[in-house]
Image: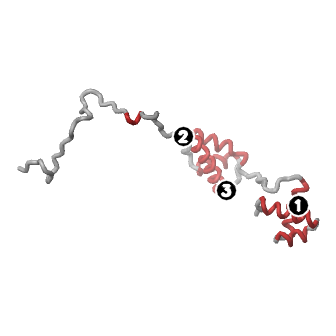
């Protein structure tokens, strides 16, 4: 678990004040090994919040998965991809392949989405009507012939 920026600043301030890992940990209220780890990272010049990801067994095959997803327009199934990868020398599980295919399909779909741009009319354009020829004029009166309304002859 990583510490927030505020907690890190408190750890560094306590260590700079005491110059002792144990005392700084007591002041901040965390374990002394936590203080030791963050102080060592600061002295080494590394960023404390940056985490490195380990290489995965599927990494060499990601380009092939992307190619299959692109060619099939996102329709290829993970079990089909897994069989092809095993034939190419992949030794990972089908679950690993499913995760990778799902991630690549998601990013492919994100690139294929329609960008929503709402229609914004020009000011005042919504007030204009084009009645055209053969249509009723705007001054026309509509009549209603529903049962029970006055003016209707029952018969």
Residue 64 location (% of width, % of height): 66, 42
Q: Is residue 91 left or right of residue 68?
A: right
- Outermost residue on the right side: it is 19
Measured Cα–Cα span from mark 1 to mark 3 = 39 Å
Crowding near the residue tagged with mark 3, few <14, some 14–19, many ≥20 C-alpha atoms within 10 Å: few
Viewer-nearest residue: 55 or 110: 110
In percent of the image, x 56 and y 45: which residue is there? 76
- Residue under pointer 1: 39
Vertical side of 3 occupied by 110: above or below? above
Q: Which comes sooner in the sequence, label 1 or label 3?
A: 1
Mark 1 or 3, closer to the camera: 1
Q: Position of residue 133 (x, y in %)?
A: 26, 27
Q: Is residue 139 above or below residue 48?
A: above
Give how far apart the Cα atoms at labels 3 and 2 are. Answer: 36 Å
Who is closer to the viewer here, 24 or 36? Answer: 24
Name the secondary structure under disc 2.
loop
Disc 2 packing (10 Å; few <14; some 14–19; many ≥20): few
């Amino acid at each position: 678990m990583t510490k927030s920026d505020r907690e890190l600043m408190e750890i560094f301030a306590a260590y700079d004040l005491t110059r002792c890992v144990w005392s700084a940990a007591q002041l901040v209220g965390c374990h002394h090994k936590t203080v030791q780890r963050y102080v060592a990272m600061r002295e080494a010049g590394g960023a404390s919040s940056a985490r490195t990801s380990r290489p995965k067994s599927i990494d060499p095959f990601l380009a092939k998965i992307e190619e299959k997803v692109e060619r099939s327009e996102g329709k290829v199934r993970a079990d089909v991809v897994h069989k092809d990868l095993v034939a190419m020398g992949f030794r990972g599980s089908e679950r690993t392949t499913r995760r990778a295919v799902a991630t690549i399909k998601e990013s492919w779909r994100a690139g294929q989405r329609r960008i929503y741009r709402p229609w914004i009319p020009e000011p005042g354009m919504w007030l204009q009507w084009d009645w055209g020829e053969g249509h009723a004029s705007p001054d026309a009166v509509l009549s209603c012939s529903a049962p029970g309304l006055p003016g209707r002859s029952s018969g």
